[in-house]
Each structure stands twice: as C-alpha cells, then as structure tokens.
Image: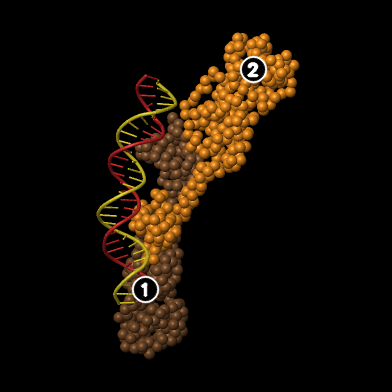
Chain colours: A orange, B brown, C red, D yellow
Amino acid sequence: MDPHRLLVFREVARAGSIAGAARSLGWTQPAVSQHLRHLERRAGVALVVRRPRGVRLTEAGEVLLRHADAVAVRLHAADDDLAALAQLRQGTVRLAAFPSASAAVVPAAMSLLGERHPGVDVRLREAEPPEALALLAAGEADLAVTFSHPGQEPDDHPGLVREAAGEDAVLLVLPDSHPQAVSTGPPVELRSLAAEKWIAGCERCAANLRRTCEEAGFVPDVRHGTDDYVVTQALIARGLGIGLLPRLALDAFTAPGVAVRPVPGLRPRSLHLVHPREADQIPAVRAAVRALRDVLAPAPG
Amino acid sequence: MDPHRLLVFREVARAGSIAGAARSLGWTQPAVSQHLRHLERRAGVALVVRRPRGVRLTEAGEVLLRHADAVAVRLHAADDDLAALAQLRQGTVRLAAFPSASAAVVPAAMSLLGERHPGVDVRLREAEPPEALALLAAGEADLAVTFSHPGQEPDDHPGLVREAAGEDAVLLVLPDSHPQAVSTGPPVELRSLAAEKWIAGCERCAANLRRTCEEAGFVPDVRHGTDDYVVTQALIARGLGIGLLPRLALDAFTAPGVAVRPVPGLRPRSLHLVHPREADQIPAVRAAVRALRDVLAPAPG
DNA sequence: CCATGCCATAAGTATGGCTTGGGGGTCGCC
DNA sequence: GGCGACCCCCAAGCCATACTTATGGCATGG
C-alpha cells in the first residue's frame, strides 16, 4: 500500500471527484486518475464508482478512507510534534554535571532555560567529569559540564565537542583558628604549608593537589580523602587538616569555623561544556548550551 | 511530512543503522541517507545521531518513530481489509428485487452465496423494477433483479448493465369452481375470457394484461388492482375475478380455491439482473451476480 | 597499521509520475 | 434537440525525483 497514493485517494474522497482532487492538489486530472487506478489494480477491488458528476466510494473505498484518514492524522501529528521540538515548545535535555557545578551554576542555568523555553525539560545527573564523558559517549546524556585542572589533559572521546566555559579559582581552606587564616595578613605561600595535614578531594582534585605541592617543593601529607566538599570542610573546621577547594564549591556552601584564603600562583581549574558534535542540530540541547554559557560567562574567572 | 520517507526512517530505526536499513530495503546506503537528510531538513531537528557503529535515535527520532509505527500499522491494516474484500472474506451487497423474486429465487441465491462466501453479507430490499433502477442509479443498491413483459422496453439508465436472466411464464389464475378450471380440459383461449372480471397487478403487469387482451381482441374489465399476489389469489378464490400471475409468484404461494392454467400464446415475462457497469470490479457484487445466475439458470423458462 | 565497518557528498542515470492531447459519456440549458 | 460544460479514460512524451555509482572521512578491532 503506497501511502502517497493513499493520501491522493483521500483527497478524491474529500473532493467527491477526481478532477476536484486534482484541482486541490494543483495537478491535472489524469495524474490523480492514474494514482487511483494503480491503487485499484493493486487492491483488486474498485475503490470508487465513476459517475457523470464525479465519483462515489464503494464499500472498499469507504474502508480505505478510514485508514487514509488515520494515516493523515498521524502524519499531521508527527509534523506538529517535530515542530514543537524544533521551536522549543517541547524537549528534554539530559545534563550531566559535577557536584559543585550542580549546586549553583546548573540550577541557575536551568531556571534561565525555563524562563526562555517553558516547555523544555532538563534532567540533571550528577557525575564527575570522567563519568559524565562516558554517559555522553554511551548516549545516556546530551550535555555535560566538566572541569579539568591545569596540566590535566581532558581525555577527548571521539564525536564529542569540548567548549571552554570559564575558570574556577582554587582556594585554600583552613580552620579559622589557623595562624594564616587572617585575611588581613600577608599573602599565603603554599610552601609554608608543607608540614600541614591535607585533605584531598576527588581523584583529579587529589592529583592536582599533589602536582601543585610538588611545584612548591614538597609532598603533601594527605590524611583524608573525600569528594564531598561539605565533609571536607567539616574535617577542616575540626582542625583535622587543610585543603584546596574550588570557588564554586565554596559559593554553594562554606562551613562555619573555616577560613578561605587565596594563594598567589595557584592556578584555577577550567570549566567545559561537552556535548556530541551534532548537538547543535537538537534545539533543546542547543538552548541548554546557550543558557549554561550565559550563566557561566560572567562567572568566576 | 512525506509518508514514504517516514517509512524509510522507520526502517532505519528498526535496523539501527542507515546501511542496515538499506540492506533490508534492497537499496544502497546513500539512498536511505538522502531520505533521512530530507526528513531532517524539513523537520529542522536531527532525528538520529550518527555514531561509528550505526545511528541512535534522538528524542525527535523517538517521537517520530511512534508516529511511523502507527502509520505502518494502518497501512498494513488497509492492505488486509482490502484483501479480505477482494478475496470475498468480507463484503456487503445491497440487493433490490421485486416481490415474487424476493420470495423464492433471492433467498435461494442468498443461501448459495452464503455457502460459497460466508463472510459476504447481503441486504435485500424489495422494490418493483422502476424503483430498483432508481436505487441503483442513486447508488443505494448494488444489484437489482427486475422483469419486463414482452413489448415493454425496459428503460435503460445510463451506466447500468442489464443481463437476461431467464423467463418467467405468465399463467391464468381462476377460481377452481370456474368452468375452465379443469386441467384436463381443452387449452384455454384468452378470448373466451372477454366477459370476465379481471384483477390487475402492479402497474407494469396491468399494462401487460391490457396489451395481451387487446391482442386477443377485447378490453379487459379490470375491477380490482393490487400488486400483492396473495391478495390477488384471495380475491380470485372468492370468485371476485380472474387474473394473470407469473410462475414465480405461484411457486412462492398458491392459494387454496384457485386453479392455475397455461394459456397458449401467452408470452412469458423476461427476468433481468441489473447492476452498475463497474460491478464486476467489486468482488462481492460479482459473486452475488453469479449466485443469482446459478439459481436462475435452470429456472422457469 | 591496515582492514572493515559506518557515514556523507557529488554526479550520473533511469524509473516513475505528471502533463499534454486525444476521445467517450452524461447532464442541463438555450 | 443540439451544444457546451463537466465528468471520466487512454496513450504518448517529457521532466523531476529518487536511486546508483564513485569517492572520501572517521572510528573500531584484529
């Protein structure tokens, strides 16, 4: 059953004549006539009875018309649905972001996106950068917010596009009873903290800590490890160690009893938006990228 | 939304790759690729994400796939329905027949048709020939059984085909007390009945009566008129008149108290099947015509 | 590292579909 | 009643769409 012919037949039924259908289709009468003939030949049944003033549907024609109407309705619905997706009246974005971004930047971007395109739905999944990339590669996420510390080359999966999205300063976090916690004091030198006990974060953050300390001439004495920045600060507040935390995490939450101090020469981590190359063909994802960019652009640098 | 392309897309979704879809369609890979591209251009949304091992549907693709499936199901159902009609597993025939045929011939034909094609449904409507032709012309009947008396040219509507379907003898009906009622007696001469009171049937039958009597040299004294052959015979049995009735009517019903006698030279009426010219394109109607032919063929002549 | 999938693009060809130009038929109106 | 208007069909020609061939890029796996 050729669906195109089916729709031509539907037009014949609607117009009540072959010539009438041809007029509404902008064709000549024989064109429609041929389509109808092919349908009837293939079906082995007459679909219409030719009469002087037009045509009249046979029983088979009536049956076929119902199917034709159903098909036409579906085609129309398909058009509408695709248009809704294209015009951002609908759509879902599966977003993967690391925890500290999820706390502040992502909610802001989601609410911006929600203002611009109320129909677009964002589903957030918290994931550290490596896992986020794996989700993208597996097709289980559409967009990821990742970071990498200086000197850490982000592993590039094929088919994924990485876009710089600003920087996020890395800051020293001390108990507020610490001698160097005074914000009016002289700039903190990292090497002066060689004897401290350290608390390391996620794997990549721990690597960054080791590398940074090595550059300053010592090996940090890492006593604890947690990728939860609330836990990290609780430990620090109790005097169990000191650590480095990114500004995004501290913006989201700063514990009482800790002090935050910049360390000259401590390089920020860079933020990225990562998405499949063809994401700009998907309006909802493109809009989410724009919203994230707009939130990150005037952000911590 | 081009439905053909939609089905190609459905095959892509099913196969999981463009090349795979091309294989199942018996096409080359670029053919399918182009269809997909056209769909995406028209829609303004990516439908699939191209990946090294094939394609993966986007959200828009998933939405479209549901519609495509629905369309495919409908097309299949349309094929099935038309096949059922073509193979006479389904179908309806609207039959118009005059009363005496409806009583005997038509039921036999309907039961024959029912044996041959149990799925075919016949709807009978009783109608005298002129009304039956009008029903055909108006498209409210598919097939008619009609008759015409000799000398009566049946009015031919355009687009209708008339087919001879045997003859139906016209017989004299008398009260059994009538002097000429004895079946062993000499042949009845019509002119010997010039002084009788007559009962006329339907309009065309009454015309035939008048014409026949005129040929025999007299004008019949028509006292009563009814197109109901049961009523006619009731009147005759009571001695209120005599009449001419066709064999089909007498086969269906002969009243007690009447005698039936052939009249030499009294010509039979001829029976016809009438249907629209394109009826042989409609399997159910064709089958009904065959069944009626088969019942009428060895019938009264 | 080359082989083997996958996909896209560009150009050529051929099939199918639409048009043109006939003709037949019925209806309605001068 | 003839004539125009309106259906419809058929046959042949032409054009456009759709499929093919040919080529190249890219990712994966032995």
* Relative to A218, residue D18 above or below: below
Near-viewer residue (A171 or A100): A171
Instruction: Name the residue beneath numbered marker 1.
Output: B147
Quadrant of image for the C terminus of chain A: top right
Q: In the rendered structure, which amino acid carries the disc numbered 1? A: Phe
Query: Residues under labels 1 and 2: Cα distance?
Result: 113 Å
* Relative to B110, residue A298 above or below: above
Check residue A263 in the rendering and tell me which mark sits there, or answer none. Answer: 2
Q: Is residue B159 left or right of residue B90?
A: left
Q: Is residue A28 left or right of residue A223?
A: left
Callout 1: helix, strand or loop?
strand
Q: Residue at x 52, y 20 (%)?
A: A153
The chain identifier of the residue carrying mark 2 reads: A
- Choose top left, top right, bottom left or bottom right for residue A200: top right
Check residue B18 in the rendering and tell me which mark sits there, or answer none. Answer: none
Callout 2: helix, strand or loop?
loop
